[in-house]
Image (cartoon, grey):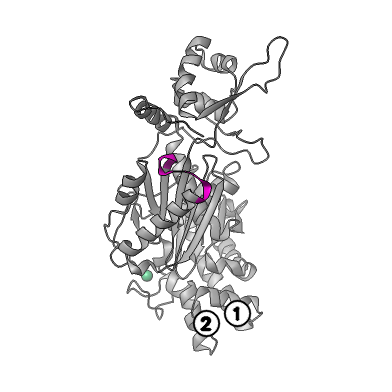
């Protein structure tokens, strides 16, 4: 499933012109070039070379060979031509551009109590979204058809058929074995263990379907949209009902041997043995500082609080007990994160999830204990910030997950080979 090291999807240049992508940190040139159509697309998309002549110069291929290799990209709709080039005398050169409308990507953020779905173009821009409150505990036979119905409605909304779908990304709120796309012994998801999540989508769209843990997906979304041009190593910490983390190392999701990397919620906090966790151990950070744990503590103190959102509401209303509790939770979380910072040395920690909406009390608590317990070198330029994408992180990350997978040179070449055996489809 994973693509080769050294290949990166071109990054959208935020201030750039429409359809023009650029990857400031493209390392394609340092790799051994085969100048396949997929690699030519990479150069066009990241702005390294946007005319036939420039591609010939960059790759050392004859101009006629470049034209020959561009042909399948043009036919498949990945590249379109404009005549907006600046002439240096004589005929203006034809400029090649990545065609972001050459297909769409479907994305689903399946949470514990909600489903959020979206459809995006190949530059990752969301074209339409839908939301439904739905319990994951209803099981895959209820939740997945609901996601499917939303996908169909989204495609209809933007006027595209299922044949336009180039990939599907799904985030699930539990441990996922990424290579197989299945949840493995998820604690709060009855019926999902080993359930073939990808089958139905694959049948319908004839496109790759990627399933990952929701926090990994959020980490990727936050990284690609906010940090990819600036840092390589990021830790995304989701503080919702429970606590989990997504690890980005060297610009990629670090999943570990089985896909369980980042599951920090069950790291034991010393001196918290009275906190019993849903996993049946005691002292887990999630059972101490997670939104559900905080709500329970507030309820004991006579407040009306059932969920992480209720805790956020109390803090925002200026409730002093709630604020103190959240700050304390931040300090406890900071102790656990200090160990992780010493191990991984991330450049930035992003706090997301429902409870991150309280903002300062939580961040201040985390900073307080983390900075005093991590090595000075590891924290010298460490940034601890709140998620910018908020509720959108899951869907955005699922889109990025798919784009990273389908737009690598290898993946593009494979798609072109498949198309060569099939009748041509007009793209956009
Ligand atoms: Zn636990």
The x and y percentages for residue 180 are 30, 48
Residue, far bottom:
302
The x and y percentages for residue 75 are 46, 25
Q: From the viewer's perspective, is residue 139 above or below residue 209?
A: below
Q: Is residue 363 magenta?
A: no
Q: Residue at x 58, y 63 (%)?
A: 372
Q: Observer-nearest residue: 45 or 160? A: 160
Residues shaded magenta: 157-166
Instruction: Give SS at disc 1.
Output: helix
Residue, far right:
89
Q: Residue at x 68, y 23 (%)?
A: 84
Q: Name the residue under label 1.
A: 314
Q: Observer-nearest residue: 50 or 281? A: 50
Q: Observer-nearest residue: 372 or 104? A: 104
Q: Name the residue under label 2.
A: 305
Q: From the viewer's perspective, is residue 336 above or below residue 313?
A: above
Residue 131, visible in the rendered structure:
yes
């Amino acid at each position: 499933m994973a693509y080769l090291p050294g290949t990166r999807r071109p990054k959208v240049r935020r201030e750039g012109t429409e359809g023009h992508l650029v990857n400031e940190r493209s390392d394609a040139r340092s790799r051994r070039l085969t100048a396949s159509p997929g690699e030519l697309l990479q150069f066009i998309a990241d702005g390294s070379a946007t005319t036939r002549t420039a591609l010939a110069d960059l790759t050392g291929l004859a101009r006629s060979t470049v034209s020959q290799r561009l042909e399948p990209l043009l036919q498949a709709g990945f590249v379109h031509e404009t005549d907006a080039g600046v002439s240096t005398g004589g005929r203006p050169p034809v400029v090649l551009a990545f065609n972001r409308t050459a297909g769409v990507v479907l994305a689903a953020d399946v949470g514990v109590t909600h489903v959020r779905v979206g459809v995006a173009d190949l530059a990752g821009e969301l074209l339409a979204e839908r939301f439904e409150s739905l319990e994951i505990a209803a099981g895959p036979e209820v939740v997945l058809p609901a996601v499917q119905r939303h996908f169909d409605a989204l495609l209809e909304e933007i006027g595209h058929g299922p044949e336009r779908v180039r990939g599907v990304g799904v985030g699930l709120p539990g441990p996922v074995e990424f290579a197989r796309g299945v949840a493995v012994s998820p604690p709060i998801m009855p019926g999902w263990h080993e359930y073939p999540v990808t089958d139905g989508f694959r049948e319908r769209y004839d496109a790759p379907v990627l399933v990952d843990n929701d926090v990994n997906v959020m980490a990727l979304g936050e990284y690609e949209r906010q940090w990819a041009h600036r840092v390589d190593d990021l830790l995304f910490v989701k503080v919702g009902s429970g606590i989990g983390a997504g690890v980005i190392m060297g610009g990629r999701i670090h999943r570990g041997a089985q896909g369980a990397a980042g599951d920090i919620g069950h790291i034991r906090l010393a001196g918290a043995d009275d906190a019993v966790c849903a996993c049946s151990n005691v002292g887990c950070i999630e059972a101490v500082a997670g939104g559900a744990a905080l709500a329970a503590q507030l309820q004991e103190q006579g407040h009306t609080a059932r969920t992480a959102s209720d805790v956020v509401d109390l803090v925002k209303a200026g409730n002093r007990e709630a604020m103190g509790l959240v700050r304390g939770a931040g300090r406890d979380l900071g102790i656990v994160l200090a160990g992780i910072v010493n191990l991984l040395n991330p450049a930035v920690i992003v706090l997301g999830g429902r409870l991150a909406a309280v903002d300062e009390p939580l961040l201040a608590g985390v900073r307080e204990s983390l900075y005093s317990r991590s090595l000075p070198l590891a924290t010298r330029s460490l940034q601890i910030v709140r998620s910018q994408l908020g509720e959108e992180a899951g869907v955005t990350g699922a889109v990025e997950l798919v784009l990273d997978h389908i737009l690598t040179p290898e993946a593009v070449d494979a798609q072109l080979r498949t198309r060569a055996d099939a009748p041509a489809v007009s793209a956009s």
